[in-house]
Image: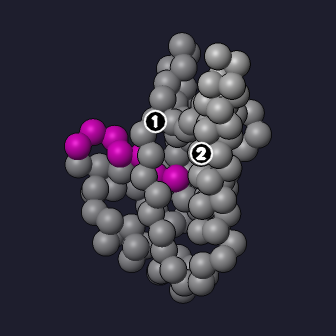
Amino acid sequence: RQAKGNSQFDLYNEIADNFYSLIKFITDDLPEDMIVFVTMHEEKNDMGESKPKTIGKLLDDKVCVEGMFTIVLKLDGKYVFATNTDGLDVTKSPIGMFEETYIDNDVQLVVNKIREYYK
């Protein structure tokens, strides 16, 4: 029985490590002009604050996932992205990238804004 518990813990360690390695590869090893979208579900705590859902405490205690990205957009409703936080989430974008707090749910619009901002 003990071995099963340890192997399950090892599995979660491996998943967390692989996820972290994937993010590091995206942020550190890909060409600067390549735009990569990472989609994640969100989870809310008892106070209504939301953040990206991860494998759990194993990753959350070691890494601030959203801190590894310059831009974090949130699907808000069916047809819009939030571009900046409402104070209860981790949504963020560089100052001046988006004029509006909410934009159309249009990935090409986001790509165009990113390319325009970073020239």
Residue pointed to by mark 1: 42
> Which mark lies nearer to you, 2 or 1?
2
Q: Residue 19 vs residue 73: left or right?
A: right
Q: Mark 2 to mark 1: distance in Å?
A: 18 Å
Which tag, 2 or 1, sits closer to the chain's start?
A: 2
Q: Label 2 amino acid?
A: Ile
- Quarter in which the N terminus is drawn: top right
In this view of the protein, which residue sits in the foreground, 11 or 118? 11
Q: Which residues are magenta?
A: 72-78
- The circle drawn on residue 28 is none
Query: Is the Cβ of the residue at disc 2 closer than 8 Å to that at disc 1?
Result: no
Residue pointed to by mark 2: 15
- Residue occupying image coordinates x 66% and y 77%: 29
21 in relation to 34, above or below: above
94 in relation to 50, above or below: below
79 in relation to 117, above or below: above
Q: Label 1 amino acid?
A: Glu
* Image quadrant in which you'd find residue 56: top right
Residue 95 visible, this orientation: no
